[in-house]
Each structure stands twice: as structure tokens, then as C-alpha cells.
Image (spheres, rainbow, N blue to C red):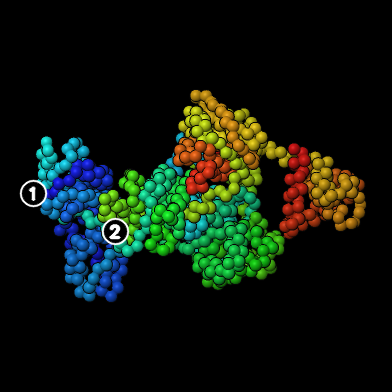
Amino acid sequence: MKITLLTKTLKKGLAVVEKIAGRVSTLPILNNVLIEVSPNFIKLSTTDLELGAQWWGLCKTEKDGKLTIPAKFFSQLVNSLNDEKIDIEEKNKTIFIESKNYKTQIKGFSTDDFPIIPSFSKDAFIEVNSKKLKDGLSDVIDFTSLSQVRPEISGVYFSFGSEELKLVTTDSFRLAEKTITFSEKKEEYKNLFKKEINFILPQKTAKELISILGDTVKNTRIYLSESQVMFETLLQETDHPEVNLVSRLIEGEYPTYQEIIPKESQTKITINKDEFINQLKIASLFGGKINEIKIKANAETKELEILSQDPDLGESKSNIAAKIEGDKADVSFNWRFVLDGLAKIKSSEVFFGLHDNKGPAILKPIGDASYLYVVMPINPD
Amino acid sequence: MTYQELWQTVLAQIQLNISPANFATWFASTKIASQEEGVIIVSVPNSFAKEWLEQKYNKEILKILRALDASIKEISYQIDFPAAKIREPIKQPAPQELPVEQLGFAELEIDKETNLNPKYGFQNFIVGPFNELAHAAAEAIIKEPGKIYNPLFIYGGVGLGKTHLLQAIGNELSKKNPPYKVKYVPSDKLISAIVNAIRNNSIEELKANLRKVDVLIVDDVQFFAGKEKTQEEFFHTFNDLYQRGKQIILSSDRPPKAIPAITERLKSRFEGGMVADVSLPDYETRLAILKQKTMEKNAEVPAKVLEYIAANIQKNVREIESALNRLLIFQKINNKVPSFEEAKKLLRNIIISPSKFTNPTLILQAISEFYDLEDKNLFYSSRKKEFVKPRQLAMYLLRKELSFSFPAIGRKFGGKDHTTVMHACHLIDREIQENEKFCQEVDSILQKIYTLEA
């Protein structure tokens, strides 16, 4: 192997693949990154056997070849190089890295033991706008269940309809649903499967995907096989893949979550988001160990009251003017759960619907039907 | 040679040739799933293992297998999810420091296949004289479903643990090996499913679905009253399951005989197996329930307070629980165990519910308002139907709500004989048992009585 490439390019590639290496300690080879060189392309691969990442970058190839070397180490080294270009050459399982002011060598290992990252049939795929996918995932990613007791809800539910994509997460106390609609004119969405596609993506993969998507301009392609999914981004310069992220899918059926979303609220509140967040933060100081705050709404006084009480510290009470319709309400919440949801809402006004003191409450941005967040209260008795 | 022995031979030989780390990574949780015409199907836990075995070890594995059985021509690998299929038992939530209950989405707790909520089990079901018959029947069914008590019909008042018992039987049976196919349906869900099926022309599908199960549990069948189509469909499903020895378990708030507007044939089916009642728990059992709940919640409540609750809340286990929760909240907020006096104060409005206060004037006023009569009409000795019923009801309620003596009631109604009053009470009692509509009337009158006072 003998290549010359831009340091910047290599840094980018390592940033994509490095995190996945070294997560499994049982098999030492998984600490390594697999480097494969073909004409014009360098390819880096890492895997933890649940997730596999492959990255391609353009380079000037003088000689093909492949080798594996410790990923973290390689990445640390490359990240401290400042020269514009570097030369990489492999001789006798050792990699020689050379730049204008620098020369180093790293011992490598044979590629024979490196796992094979599963491949996909490329006949059918779904194509989506990368930015929309990334933003949508960021809005829901924090609410998956962390426990493995119910594997189905430990991931992000993807549901591709004919013109939209729904992303859903829940940890059984709250639920977030993002509906991404695509513009047909801008070719933001294409579904070559010609049918509805649903799957549950592990949260770890979704996080990785968010960071990989970064500011990708071209659409992301999604390939599926039995139990596996692959996300593919394309190089800016040419239509060659840049990153392939391969992951297992979570087996099982996603709960019929639509039943959870309240259709109608008994108390309907419209309130300034920033003010609401601010008052919640003040109340949270007195939330005690259990993070409990109480929210009271009264349509007559047109005020939302937030109360909290800590036997050791004291108590807090604040009032915010709000538009309130419907029944009087008096509901206790974990303030963290309410703030988490508000943090994902971008509009300046927010709709807050309460059911009763034991039923689900709903948060929605005003003027944006694409997002909703359902949260359960704390049991009052 | 069994599949297991065959695969063990493969593993034994392969491990000699590869590193332990590789062996553990690629061969863990692999096994032979089946064999068809010379093709061995090997199940592997993930697609990485599949690719690896296919591309790196296929030759070697095939060689070993062929040495054992020359008819084997080929190996195919298939991904299986051992972890996801065997559902871990739901762990009890870790004991919390403080008894806060963050509510969750109930819809997610429920098992999709069986409709059961795994939190209902026998480990937290308290048996006492009030429910031991039902419990014993349940145990017998778990041993041999479909054999002895079929159907099992459990009845009793609100909040006494019928649903808990029903679900616990279901959970127990679906955990058995091999598991029974259990389906739990609350009757209102069943009714709406049947209505929908009729509308969508998918009734056959629904019936086929219901008939696939080994154990069918229907909660609150009293709601079938007056739903003729539902009764008919259910009747056929019932017969079909019964004839094939499948277990049927039903619950209701009253015995089959007393469910109004249910066809005779269905009633007799309900009574055909075992009818067991769940009545009010006695003092000792109530105390045992309280102790169990305090333990579950990991809380500390003085014995005297528990005894006080047990002595004063008699009708409903759910109320007992809510009383306990109230104490725990006090504890949470004030960081101390409530004293007996404090507890008494806290529980005042549960124990002395407003329903305890009323007077004859209010009762009579409510009745006359409800039936649109003038107060004095109630005292007419008229035999007109529109007067008789309200008068009898007034007597009944005076007796029931205020514990007036029969002669005292008789005097109030213009010197009627006490036997007349007794007869009236008896008639109304029967009417309430048998006539759902009338029962509802009485309920709303009762509500009226107590709201009038408020």
C-alpha cells in the first residue's frame, strides 16, 4: 500500500470510524481499524459486532493493499499532525507515515481476523434528506428506554409512509413523536421499496448516525436486509459512498404507541416557552430528591402556577400569565421530564395540554404540527 | 445423533484450531436449528457471525459434519435472536428511597400477545377467607387447565381483586412450559371489537382469532347485558372452546343469575363450571394486605396506624391502598413517619366519607325531584304505579342509608305496618339485583342525595 492524501480527509474519516472501535474487549482485533486501499480510494472500517462503520476518502494511490492497526492510537497520532498532506506506506505489516516535518511507523496486524461487515443488496433503498433526518433524530433521541427489559422501546422507531417519516421514542414515562414531511420538488424523499417500511433502530446507532450526518448535503440512503440496516452517505465530490453505517435492528414489534397520545385535553394551556422554562428551572431548585413540582392551571385567573417544596430548603411559587381553556388542573410532574420536552421545542409559544392528575399531558410547539411530546405525571395519591 | 450432539462435535473440533477469543466471539449461541434434505441450518446470533462462519469456517464445519453424516451436503446460516425471544422476566422495580410514583404509560406494560399485565401475579395476591374459594379454584386450573373447573366464574364487588386473580392465572399459565396461549379481554373491548368486526365484515377473522387460544379470560361480563349480538358471538366461541377442552375464565360484579338481560343459554353456560365469589376481606386480611403493601413500597408505618386503617376501611382494597399512599406522601413531604394522631387527621376524608351524612328530608327531596313528584305525593296512599315505586324506594333508602327501623319508616309514611315496609324493601332489593336500568336510577338518586347535601 502506498498513498498520498490530505491530512484533513484522513482526520475526518477517523472521526467517523474511531468511536466504534474498542468497545468490545473480548476480541482484540476489534480495537483496530481496517485500512484498505484501492485506486483513488482509501477505506477505513471498524466494528463492535453490532455496529459497523465504513468510510471512503479520495487519495492518490500508488499501490493497493490492506492492513489493520490500533484505531485509537492511529487517530491520536493523525489528529496531532498539522501538515497539509501525508504519505502512507505499508511494508512488512508496518505502516510508515510521513509528512513534511514528520516521520513515524506503526506496527500493524494481518487483516485475516478482521470481521466481515455484512453487505447489502443495493436494488432497493429509501432516500431521505440528511439534514431533516438528523434534526428529526435529535428531537427524539433522548427519550428511548435505557433498560433492556423491554428491548422494543430501547431504540428509535422509524416508520416510512408514502410521503413522510415518523420517528418515535418512549421510555414508558414519556414519548416523543417527530413527523418529517418531505418536499417532493426538492427530491427529499424516495422509497424504492414501494411499501411502508418500519423498523426499530438501536439508540447507539441513532447517536452515531446523528454525528455522521453532520452537515451532509446529499441525501442519505437506507438499505435493509433481514435484521440489518445500512445508512449510506455519498461523497460531496462524486457519487461514491462516503460512509456506510451498518447496524443490527431491534427485533420485536413496536408498541401501538398511537393509543398513548391523548386526542383531547381537559385543560388547554398556551404559554410563552422561555418564560415557562425559566419558571420551571426556579421551581426545580426546590424539587427535592424526587424532582417533583406541581402545576396548577385555572382558566378564570388565566394564570399558570408552579409550586415546589423541599422540606429542608423551603418552597417556591410562581405565576405565569397564560391562555387557559377548560377544567381547572392540579398536576404533579417530574420537572426534568417537562424541561426535557420543552428543550426540543423551537417555537416561542407552546401548547401544554393536561388530562387529569393521573393522565398523560402533552407538549406541542405552536404553529408546527410535526412534533409532540407526551409525559406522564407523578401519582398524586 | 441429535442436533445438539452433532453441533457439540463440531464445536469440540473447531476450538482446537482457533483462538479462544475468536471461538467465543463467533461460536457463542450458535446451534443447529434444523436439517432438510442434506442442508443443515445453523442458527447464529447476528449477521456478523453469519458472514464470518459462511466465509471463514464453512469448509471446516462441513468437513466435520460430513465425517459424521455423509448425507449432509450443505450448510445454511440463519440469524436468530436468542436474547430478544426469551423475554426476561420483568424485574420488580428497585426499592426506591421514597415512595414516589412516576406514572408510566399503562399501554406499554401490557403484553401484546396475551393482553396481560405482568405485574399481576400470585406472589402479591393475598388469600383470606373472603377469597380462598376463588383462589383454590385458580390453583386447580393452573395445574390442569380446561379439565376441572370450566368455566371458572368469579364474581364480587369493585376493588376486591377479581382482575388481579384473573390476570395472575393468565400470567401463570403463559409462563408454563410449554406455554399456554392465553388471551385476556376486558368485556368492553370485546364488545367494541365485535361491533367493529361487524362493520368491517371481519367477524370470521375475529372469531378465528379468539378460537386459537388455550385459555380465554373475559373480565366484567356483566357488560354483555343487553348486547345481543355480542352474546351470540360469544356463545358460539364459548361452545367451541369448551368442547375442545380449552379453559374459559370469566368475572363479573354479580353472580350469573343476577346479570340482567343475558340469554338463558349463556347464563346456564356461565354457571356450568365453578362459580366462586370474592367477598369483603375481613379485618385480619385487610391488615395483612396493608402490611404487604407497606413492604412493597418499602415504607415504615406504625402498626397502630395500620390497624386503624384496617378497622375503618372495610369495603374496598383500592381505598385501603389510597389511604396508605396518603400517609406515604405525608412522609415524603415532611420527612417523618406520621404519628397516630396525624394519620387520623390525614385519613379523615377517606374514612368518614361525606356519604355518611344525610337525612330523611334530603332523601325524600332527591327522590321526588328525580321522579318529578311533589314531596307530599310520596306520602299518598295511592296505588298508582308512578307513586308506588318512588314510595317503596324512599322506604328502602331510609332503611339502607339511615338504618331507620321498619316500624319507624312505617310511621313516617302515614302509619303503615312494618311488614309493608319490609315487603317494599325486599321488592326494591330484588329489582336492583335484576334490573340494570333501575339499578342505575338508584345510583343516580344516591348521587343526587349526596350532592344536594353538598
Amino acid type of the residue tagged 1 in the rendering? Lys
Quarter of the image for the C terminus of chain A: give it: top right
Residue B361 appears at what percent x and percent y? 83, 41
Q: Residue furthest front?
A: A185
The chain ID associated with circle 2 is B
Is there any visible trace of residue B235 in the rendered image? yes
* Camera-side residue of A323 and A284: A323
Kindly identify the residue that appears in the image at 74 percent across and 49 percent down: B444
Question: Which residue, given by chain and number where applicable, does mark 2 sit on?
Answer: B47
Q: Please rate how many residues cluster around mark 2, counting C-alpha atoms within 10 Å: few if below 14, some from 14 to 19, many from 20.
A: many
Tell me the distance, in whole angstroms, between the alpha carbons under discs 2 and 1.
33 Å
- Above or below, B261 relative to A29: below
* Camera-side residue of B139 and B178: B178
B377 horizontally vs B104: left or right = right
CB within 8 Å, label 2 to label 1: no
Residue A280 appears at what percent x and percent y? 51, 32
Q: Please rate how many residues cluster around mark 1, counting C-alpha atoms within 10 Å: few if below 14, some from 14 to 19, many from 20.
A: few
Residue A320 appears at what percent x and percent y? 57, 31
Kindly identify the residue that appears in the image at 17 percent across and 68 percent down: B63
Question: Which residue, given by chain and number where applicable, does mark 1 sit on?
Answer: A91
Under circle 1, the secondary element is strand
The chain ID associated with circle 1 is A
Q: Which mark is residue A154?
A: none
Amino acid type of the residue tagged 2 in the rendering? Ser
Under circle 2, the secondary element is helix
